[in-house]
């Protein structure tokens, strides 16, 4: 199929191309902020433009601007690295808002042999508490079991029975009590709160970056794609981290996802985010598996992790330890709540961060019921920023050498969305048609209908080189 964004180049008449060019709008302040946070040269923003889409990601908060800014920043980082490797000029970046909006809800567009996956389990959602609202997350079996156990609910009967019992139990409990009790049991529930009051200059950094060590520059040879030949160990789960590594795989990286055999992944989630990657299982506490991991690390260019702070450190996989064993490595981390403060070590997902940060209150319905963003925008947006940060680190490493330690969080992206982006009036009209940005292909999971990647620069790949393999079934070796 012809990728729609190619309409202004090789797949349209001159008149069509002129129309697309006239419709494009230049980069905005949100894009500039993201690019500056990545340490990019300001003059490269002149290469960025957008093709607007009516009705894309409607919300009270500027979700559309956040989404297109994060995709544009990632596209520009890819274009910059491509130019550095080829020796040519930085290619133009053209981001189609329709592609962005479609990709930001990729999990909703996914079909597996015609089946629509369930994105949220029955026990995940908003519930009335005795003094407000709480949000739970019980998509994974272990989180579901801990939620029920914390509230003294016996896991017996159908889901409709358990939904009724959970609602009745939560209605008698204060929201903060639910939050802390479920957290202590290892589950996920938060009190829905208002946006916190902040003082100027107190917002968390969107992206934290440290240059570590004095390893020699590691130039990358000319290649057809920006990340060709780059080896990435992917220690991420769920959405944000896998979106980042899915994007890096699109751009040519050899991405090997490594999971614990004791912590299964939702196969539907992996069918959405596993494109272009391979997936294996290693028990890093087992000496034999650990030796295999260390052999992989010895030839890796980057390690991307998505576990809460402290989880991998207990296994000797702290960033400084990784960089000591592999000088010049890029270590990129994403977490839910950031890297300091009382919540840093807590579990979290996009929906949970939306509820606790105040987004659910800002997006509330007229009757006071907490609201949600039109996409898991914290996950997807942070994922594209994470991929962009890795690309920029690879670009910088070619000249300055050394390793990089990068840190991002869903909570920092949430703060940027709520207080760092000036809302503008979005294009009016009816909701855009996502159909041109969907395609199908066979895969080990079945025939997949899925969202095409939204990254757009002159010469960028239009689809992944391979469909997702079955989770955890690939050999633990580089391709």
Image (cartoon, rainbow, N blue to C red):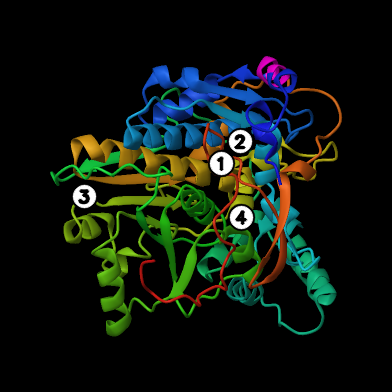
> In 3D space, how far apart are the residues under numbered discs 3 and 1 (Cα atoms)?
27 Å
Mark 3 vs mark 1, foreground winner is: 3
- Badge 3 crowding class, 10 Å Cα cut-off, few under 14, some 14 to 19, many 20 or more, is many
Locate residue 246, reporting x and y percent: 52, 54
Locate residue 321, reporting x and y percent: 21, 60
> Do residues under tags 1 and 2 come within 8 Å of each other at their CB atoms?
yes
Residue behind mark 1: 381
Front-most of 152 and 450? 450
- Range of residues picked out in magenta: 18-23
Residue behind mark 2: 67
Q: Is residue 9 above or below residue 322?
A: above
Q: Is residue 91 above or below residue 186?
A: above
- Badge 2 crowding class, 10 Å Cα cut-off, few under 14, some 14 to 19, many 20 or more, is many
> In 3D space, how far apart are the residues under numbered discs 4 and 3 (Cα atoms)?
39 Å
- Badge 4 crowding class, 10 Å Cα cut-off, few under 14, some 14 to 19, many 20 or more, is many
- Element assignment for label 4: strand
Front-most of 112 and 378? 112
Residue 161 appears in which quarter of the rendering?
Answer: bottom right
**Magenta span has 298?**
no
Residue behind mark 3: 328
């Amino acid at each position: 199929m012809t990728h729609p964004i190619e309409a202004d180049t090789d797949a349209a008449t001159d008149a069509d191309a002129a129309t697309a060019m006239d419709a494009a709008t230049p980069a905005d302040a949100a894009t500039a902020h993201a690019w500056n946070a990545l340490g990019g040269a300001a003059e490269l923003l002149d290469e960025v433009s957008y093709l607007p889409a009516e009705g894309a990601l409607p919300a009270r908060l500027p979700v559309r601007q956040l989404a297109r800014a994060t995709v544009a920043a990632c596209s520009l980082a890819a274009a910059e690295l491509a130019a550095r490797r080829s020796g040519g000029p930085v290619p133009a970046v053209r981001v189609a808002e329709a592609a962005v909006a479609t990709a930001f809800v990729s999990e909703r567009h996914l079909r597996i042999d015609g089946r629509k996956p369930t994105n949220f389990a029955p026990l995940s959602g908003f519930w009335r508490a005795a003094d407000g609202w709480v949000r739970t997350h019980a998509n994974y079996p272990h989180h579901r079991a801990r939620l029920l156990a914390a509230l003294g609910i016996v896991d017996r009967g159908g889901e409709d029975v358990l939904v009724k019992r959970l609602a009745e139990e939560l209605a008698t409990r204060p929201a903060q009590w639910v939050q802390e009790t479920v957290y202590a049991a290892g589950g996920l529930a938060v009190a829905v709160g208002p946006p916190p009051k902040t003082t100027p200059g107190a917002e968390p950094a969107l992206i934290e970056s440290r240059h570590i060590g004095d390893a020699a520059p590691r130039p990358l040879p000319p290649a057809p794609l920006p990340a060709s030949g780059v080896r990435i160990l992917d220690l991420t789960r769920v959405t944000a981290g896998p979106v980042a590594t899915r994007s890096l795989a699109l751009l040519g990286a050899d991405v090997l996802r490594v999971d614990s055999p004791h912590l299964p992944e939702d196969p539907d989630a992996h069918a959405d985010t596993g494109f272009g990657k391979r997936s294996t299982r290693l028990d890093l506490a087992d000496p034999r598996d650990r030796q295999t991991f260390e052999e992989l690390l010895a030839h890796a260019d980057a390690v991307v992790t998505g576990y809460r702070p402290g989880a991998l450190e207990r296994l000797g996989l702290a960033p400084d330890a990784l960089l000591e064993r592999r000088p010049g490595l890029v270590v990129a981390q994403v977490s839910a709540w950031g890297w300091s403060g009382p919540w840093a070590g807590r579990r979290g997902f996009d929906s949970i961060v939306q509820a606790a940060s105040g987004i659910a209150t800002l997006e509330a319905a007229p009757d006071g019921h907490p609201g949600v963003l039109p996409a898991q925008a914290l996950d997807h947006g942070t994922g594209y920023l994470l991929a962009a940060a890795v690309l920029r680190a690879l670009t910088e490493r070619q000249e300055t050498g050394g390793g990089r330690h990068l840190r991002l969080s869903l909570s920092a992206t949430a703060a940027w969305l709520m207080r760092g982006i000036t809302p503008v009036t979005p294009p009016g009209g009816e909701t855009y048609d996502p159909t041109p940005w969907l395609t199908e292909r066979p895969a080990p999971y079945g025939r997949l209908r899925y969202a095409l990647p939204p990254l757009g620069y002159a010469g960028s790949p239009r689809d992944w080189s391979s469909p997702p393999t079955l989770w955890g079934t690939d050999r633990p070796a580089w391709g």
